Image (cartoon, rainbow, N blue to C red):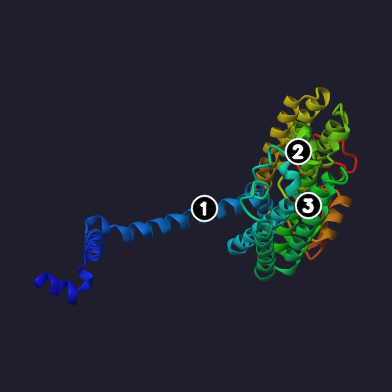
């Protein structure tokens, strides 16, 4: 009777429902035990750890993509040339705060230009072995994302230079970005003259640094830009010769592709290496550096010229690689020499520079003095400029456009 009443008044205690009830009770019991077990206590920290790991992984992914889009090592070389120009353009003490802002703005603009370069060349890069693993050809980042990154850092860098340096430096940076991304980049697929346009692009950053430090551009500011312009041609000619097959596969119109023997390519490299030789003399004559820089610069340029001549005489990949390595060594040593031997009073008016070509270094000023008897007598006073040692003119003969050597009277 009890059983019948239970079934009558409590139908959910039927056999099937009783089984379901027992099953649900068992599940809840197991779930309760799992929640209150020691392993369950670690589930929340494990979830947080996984979220943190995913965030770090995502940050590393995009940081790597931005680094490669910016061609960071190339951008840092641009920053180094701009910083050197800033130091050379400083009259005496270097404003470290302004130098830091200038380098940061230059880095941002250079990163923008390099990123836009890869956006425009994504299809070409996909065909070349050495560029196929870049972020855009490999699909690790989208083109709109790369454009957004390039635009933000480009505008930010230009604004930083305009506010922390001056409008002249910001204008040079913006002009260089346009020249690199919108002129040099498309020219690479049209005509070999792209290499010479690229050399102009590389020569502007030190001019930017000088303008940021001094607020103007004078004749002395052209030494380092000239060195960078002439240096880039043997540097890129060696690279273009070594990577001819890759450039051909990518559809780039490099000078070396139309030069099967490599003779004209090597000749361009040799000719521009020789053009570097007078720069040390001009840097001293214009008052940018001391006389010791003449010797160091001459030795350095003769070394890279010898490597270029070796490549011209024997046009092999090994000789091209040797000249390429010589060019990599040349630039930091040349810039270091400029910084070590720079003169703090190197910002002279152009008129003073012009007069230094006309006046002989042995010229003297004549002043009038009165002796004890009140009679006037003439006395010669040497020029403010010190006599140049004979060694500074040891190699002046091959360069007839330099002033004729002369020496102070004893």
Q: Secondary structure beneath disc 3?
A: helix
Q: Mark 3 highlights which residue?
A: 201
Q: x and y percent of residue 300 in the render?
A: 72, 35
Residue 101 visible in this rendered orientation of the protein: yes
Q: Mark 1 highlights which residue?
A: 60
- Looking at the image, tell me whether mark 1 or mark 2 is earlier in sequence order: 1
Q: Residue at x 70, y 69 (%)?
A: 162
Q: Mark 2 highlights which residue?
A: 235
The mark total stands at: 3
Q: Residue at x 42, y 58 (%)?
A: 52
Q: CA distance from mark 2 to mark 3?
A: 14 Å
Crowding at mark 2 (Cα within 10 Å: few <14, some 14-19, many 20+) = many
Q: x and y percent of residue 73 in the render?
A: 63, 47
Q: Which one is in front, 97 or 345?
A: 97
| Label 1 vs label 2, nearer the camera | 1
Q: Quadrant of the N terminus?
A: bottom left
243 to 388, vertically: above or below: above
């Amino acid at each position: 009777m009890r059983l019948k009443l239970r079934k009558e008044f409590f139908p959910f205690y039927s056999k099937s429902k009783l089984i379901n009830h027992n099953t649900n009770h068992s599940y809840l019991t197991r779930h309760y035990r799992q929640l209150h077990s020691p392993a369950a206590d670690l589930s929340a920290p494990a979830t947080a750890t996984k979220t943190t790991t995913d965030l770090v992984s995502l940050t590393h992914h995009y940081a790597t993509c931005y680094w490669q889009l910016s061609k960071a090592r190339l951008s840092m070389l641009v920053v180094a040339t701009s910083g050197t120009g800033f130091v050379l353009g400083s009259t005496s003490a270097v404003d470290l705060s302004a130098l830091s802002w200038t380098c940061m703005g230059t880095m941002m603009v250079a990163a923008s230009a390099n990123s836009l370069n890869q956006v425009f060349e994504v299809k070409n890069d996909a065909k070349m072995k050495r560029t196929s693993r870049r972020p855009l050809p490999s699909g690790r980042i989208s083109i709109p994302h790369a454009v957004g990154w390039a635009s933000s850092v480009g505008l930010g860098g230009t604004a930083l230079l305009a506010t922390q340096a001056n409008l002249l430096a910001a204008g040079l940076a913006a002009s260089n970005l346009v020249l690199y991304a919108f002129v040099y980049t498309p020219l690479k697929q049209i005509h070999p003259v792209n290499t010479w346009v690229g050399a102009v692009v590389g020569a502007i950053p030190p001019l930017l640094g000088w303008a940021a430090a001094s607020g103007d551009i004078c004749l002395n500011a052209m030494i380092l830009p000239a060195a960078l312009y002439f240096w880039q041609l043997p540097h890129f000619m060696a690279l273009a010769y070594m990577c001819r097959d890759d450039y051909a596969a990518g559809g780039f119109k490099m000078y070396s592709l139309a030069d099967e023997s490599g003779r004209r390519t090597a000749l361009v490299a040799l000719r521009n290496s020789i053009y570097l030789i007078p720069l040390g003399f001009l840097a001293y004559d214009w008052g940018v550096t001391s006389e010791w820089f003449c010797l160091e610069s001459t030795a350095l340029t003769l070394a890279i010229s010898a490597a270029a001549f070796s490549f011209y005489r024997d046009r092999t990949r090994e000789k091209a690689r040797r000249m390429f390595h010589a060019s990599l060594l040349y630039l930091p040593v040349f810039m270091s020499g400029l910084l070590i031997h720079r003169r703090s009073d190197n910002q002279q008016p152009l008129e003073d520079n012009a007069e230094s070509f006309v006046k002989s270094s042995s010229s003297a000023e004549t002043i009038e003095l009165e002796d004890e008897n009140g009679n006037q007598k003439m006395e010669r006073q040497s020029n403010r400029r010190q006599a140049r040692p004979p060694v500074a003119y040891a190699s002046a003969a091959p360069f007839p456009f330099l002033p004729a050597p002369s020496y102070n009277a004893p």
